[in-house]
Image (cartoon, coloured by chain):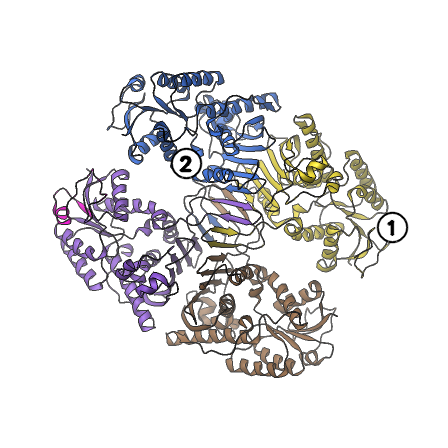
Chain colours: A yellow, B brown, C blue, D purple
Amino acid sequence: MQLKIGIIGLGRIGRIHYNNIRHHIPEADVVMVSDVDKNGLPEDVPQVDAGTLIGHPDVDAVVICSPTDTHADYVDRCARQGKHVFCEKPLDLSLDRIRETLAVVREHNIQLMLGFNRRFDTNFMKLKALVDEGKIGEVQLVKITSRDPAPPSVDYLRSSGGLFLDMTIHDFDMARYVMGKEVKEVYAAASELTGGAVAEAGDIDTAVITLKFEDGSMAVIDNSRKAVYGYDQRLEVFGSKGMAHVENNRPDNHVYYNESGASSALPLHFFMERYMASYLTEMTAFIKSVQGKLPVPVGGLDGLKATMLAVAAQQSVAQHAPVTVAGEGKPASVS
Amino acid sequence: MQLKIGIIGLGRIGRIHYNNIRHHIPEADVVMVSDVDKNGLPEDVPQVDAGTLIGHPDVDAVVICSPTDTHADYVDRCARQGKHVFCEKPLDLSLDRIRETLAVVREHNIQLMLGFNRRFDTNFMKLKALVDEGKIGEVQLVKITSRDPAPPSVDYLRSSGGLFLDMTIHDFDMARYVMGKEVKEVYAAASELTGGAVAEAGDIDTAVITLKFEDGSMAVIDNSRKAVYGYDQRLEVFGSKGMAHVENNRPDNHVYYNESGASSALPLHFFMERYMASYLTEMTAFIKSVQGKLPVPVGGLDGLKATMLAVAAQQSVAQHAPVTVAGEGKPASVS
Amino acid sequence: MQLKIGIIGLGRIGRIHYNNIRHHIPEADVVMVSDVDKNGLPEDVPQVDAGTLIGHPDVDAVVICSPTDTHADYVDRCARQGKHVFCEKPLDLSLDRIRETLAVVREHNIQLMLGFNRRFDTNFMKLKALVDEGKIGEVQLVKITSRDPAPPSVDYLRSSGGLFLDMTIHDFDMARYVMGKEVKEVYAAASELTGGAVAEAGDIDTAVITLKFEDGSMAVIDNSRKAVYGYDQRLEVFGSKGMAHVENNRPDNHVYYNESGASSALPLHFFMERYMASYLTEMTAFIKSVQGKLPVPVGGLDGLKATMLAVAAQQSVAQHAPVTVAGEGKPASVS
Amino acid sequence: MQLKIGIIGLGRIGRIHYNNIRHHIPEADVVMVSDVDKNGLPEDVPQVDAGTLIGHPDVDAVVICSPTDTHADYVDRCARQGKHVFCEKPLDLSLDRIRETLAVVREHNIQLMLGFNRRFDTNFMKLKALVDEGKIGEVQLVKITSRDPAPPSVDYLRSSGGLFLDMTIHDFDMARYVMGKEVKEVYAAASELTGGAVAEAGDIDTAVITLKFEDGSMAVIDNSRKAVYGYDQRLEVFGSKGMAHVENNRPDNHVYYNESGASSALPLHFFMERYMASYLTEMTAFIKSVQGKLPVPVGGLDGLKATMLAVAAQQSVAQHAPVTVAGEGKPASVS
């Protein structure tokens, strides 16, 4: 029996999920889609409004890829209809709103998975595996470099929640995931250095965030909205028994030498190229967890925790001081 | 209008093509399949015998993935029915038989493409592009390392035509492709060094083959049937203006350091892993060339030429001397 | 005319300088040495006490490699005798004492160079050159990884001044050097995670230090006293026009592949191996600057500034808050 | 007791040995030198004619760095005077002349070491060690890439003995050294592709040489006189248990990324840079072997064998056929 899925929102990321489910995951199919923009929707699957989709008896699970400010509401409605949900990050920009939704999810006992796709990247999974196998020993430091090739538009930036909630949130999740521990304290140093859209939006574009975990181990994240050489996504794990790191993926591994020097390819340009494979692995994991074959790998508490870290980072910048993070629940990843 | 394709032979490679055409190439679909072994065939597409498939009016083009000794016959029959053909290499082990088939193909004016999939590997395409852009200048030397992780069975070896026709044939094609010139002379030094199946089959497992091109430039290929560390596929191009090389692809790019040393991943294990993406690019190119959007990228003469080099290498070992290769036609790749 | 040099202190580092001056720098020679331990001193050069050496008319310049608590006193005495001085870092652990000595140095107008040898490492010099050539554009972030293979003894640790003054001080200097700007604020997060000698000495062994420069650009340093895989010394520079990084040097560049994986050499073991070449370049620069051929590349103010950052890091840990660094003078490197 | 050494010939390579012995090898010193060109000789050591140097009672051993056509004669004269000899390669361009000299050397029982310095390169030593430790298993293939940055002058080329005797001779020695076996057969394919000095001198500049060893294992060498990107010196060893390779050394390991791509340093420019450290290790080994602490690591038979392979390669090109190499003696390296 194929799992019957409805997708709400067929923008860039929604189409990736659509394509993966239809063509690469035999255990599931897309049975209907919903988008406010009717242009360019796939023609071989029924188009309905979001309410119809959520309530439709043919739909087993819903994949939510609509704008952030609709996420919590759609998740609530899915939960009340007993539909399992895969929701793109973040669940919401407000911690209270996230907590409300998580309560609804618990009440109706549905599966909720958050779209922290980077956990499904081959490279990062390998580092996590080395940690889990004990090859790193006690993890003492995690280092994350996460830089975008160029800032988004002013409009996007204004509704994004800012650097920490929009961009660093992935890195906060990665730090918790690789460490397998909870953060106790956040210190964030940040600047606006690139001008342009970021300056206009009144946001920051460059940040160094130090996380201190319960046992004194640490993580450090560095972000930039504008790395002219492309999308820079690196990870390092250091511990009592060893260290491991992964570098960027490249479109090919040629090296060309001439009189001027040796040159090679830049990193894969942006998240669509770099993380394409991770989206398939991620959606496959969601479908397996709905089918009861796997526990949900990234749960609602993971979304809450990452958002708490982002909010703490904002406070740290505002207060110009380290900020303590309240303990709260236990995330799927470290249950 | 989708191109309607029939596939003959659904072994390992046939299934790759089946999957690519069905799920990844919207411009085409598989309308029927044929295999002597009825077990495990896909159920959602009609299964017929090869003759029916070749003669069926619903079939626009045929993909031939059956055993080598059926290739030439199937291509002949397809040509007479006016069907375009994608045929796995080699067309045949006999040069005369290949020449007969190419005559039939010419007479009936169908498109014939040979399955030298490595031309569609991202890394090798990048080197070819550097050559074509003039970045290498006059190409003076091409170096190919091509080693399998383990020898096939004695049975396979006995019907394979030997190392040069079975394995090096890909490298012969690559040397011609990257160079864009024709080989004038072949010298092959070869040994049986791994024992086991190769020794039992009376074949060789280790070879160094020197190719001399018309203008004095050279290529050197080294082969082994048994590289314990995996599938080793490297290419280097050296010329008057520069040099470029590509290394093996790996499943991830982690490096792990502990007290004993630094370690990283082995190359992707074998051709299924290493060249998976190339099969899709290759089949897409075939479909576009049948649709008249592209010239056939790897034609029948390319198959003939590579086989001629393999036969010359066999003669070189037998005669313990360099062997001159007769000029004949012009391949698709250097037309 | 060779520059005549006296060396005070012939421990590990003193002997490196001795050997470099005697055998590799024709423009200078060692004319006398002084050490409280008479065992194993070179026999082909006169041994005297420190006072005699500093006052001796045959000595043009003094190289001070004795214990830290003697540095300031020896520099003062050299200055009063009009001798130029190369002094190993740090000048002193007390900022006031350093300021006193710098006043004496200024009053007597001698050349004083501090032993921040890493500035003379080929890799780091290359990154600095890229910055100076404008290849990085506006530098927005400097990242320094600096980890020792194993902690020193409890005795050493107790008199070392602690992690920041003993180990990070090199990284503070490197951050200022590469940036070419002054630090405005320091935040340090630190832990004791390795137990053993560090725990016994009541010190810390793991730290992440964030530096904020006057213009909002940042640097982040991560330190560990115990990297089981060896000495880890990496540097990255990120800016508006590009990014550059250098990895560790290794004793050789072999890669070995077998069935278990691919392995390569660990980084050069410790500072003696990694920075050996830098000591020669450094001493050559000192001799040239005494001879008036070059300005002093690392002056007394550089020593003061680095120590100020170390003290600020200590305060940051103690106060659990970011600490502002007072502006003071202008270092040699950014004059 | 220091070993007292006289050096004949103070060109580029003679000066390297001079400097190494004087400044870096405490167990030896240069007591006199001889060169037909009196300009620029070191002033702090007596200058004499070659005959005086060879016969002088103060000289224990002679380092011969004069032109090739004087080597055999000087070695003969040293042997008759009972002086140990380090001689730059080749001993002579004539196999008969080499055999005569080796007879003289045997008769007078002196130590003779040949200057195959690449055996003392850290990278190549590491590969040799892996072979000796059994990590490669039965070695089946050795691959050597050896390319110069630019051809020498016409004059040099005319008296060089040609590509194989002048340049490939190092690679022939390396192949034997790493393999630890003797070559049975040589096949060389060669061309003149770079024009200029090489064309004028009537030499070749590009070659692929296949060596077959007694047990069927092979080596392949590729040479070019003109690699525009610099000195290209790589080695690979492949066998039943694994494979290892070493890449070129670079002046630094930076990688710089900007919008156009990623770039890094070219290989060290030429043999002076790449092999500088090997000359010191080599000379240290010579001095130890004269002192009886080590067997001679590269003996006269090694020189003879490498020359035999070069002559065989010349014959192979002339005869356009593989050439069998006569067995003769046993070299130092595989004794």
Q: Is residue B302 above or below residue A52?
A: below
Please check whether the numbered discs 1 and 2 fall on a single chain.
Answer: no
User: What main secondary structure does the magenta stretch of the protein show?
Assistant: loop
Quadrant placement of the C terminus of chain B:
bottom right
The quadrant of the picture occupied by the N terminus of chain B is bottom right
Left or right of residue C14, residue B23 in this image:
right
* Image mark 2: chain: C
> Can see residue A139?
no
Image quadrant in which you'd find residue A94: top right
Whether residue A165 is visible here, answered yes or no, is: yes
Crowding near the residue tagged with mark 2, few <14, some 14–19, many ≥20 C-alpha atoms within 10 Å: some
Residue D58 covered by magenta stretch? yes
Q: Position of residue A37 (x, y in %)?
A: 82, 52
Which residue corresponds to the image point at 67% horizontal and 64% vertical from the top-left?
Answer: B20
| Kind of residue at badge 2 | Tyr
B199 above or below A11? below
User: Which disc, if any, is residue A55?
Assistant: 1
Q: Is residue A80 left or right of residue B183?
A: right
Q: Taking C15 as reference, is A4 left or right? A: right
Q: Is residue B11 magenta?
A: no
CA separation, marks 1 and 2? 68 Å
Element under disc 2: loop
Q: Which mark is residue C275?
A: 2
At label 1, counting other C-alpha atoms closer than 10 Å, the crowd grade (few under 14, some 14-19, many 20 or more) is: some
Pinpoint residue C7: horizontal percent, then vertical percent.
32, 25
Looking at the image, which residue is at 72% across and 54% down? A16
Which amino acid, by three-letter code, is at mark 1? Gly
Looking at the image, which is closer to me, A201 or B307? A201
Magenta-highlighted residues: D39-62
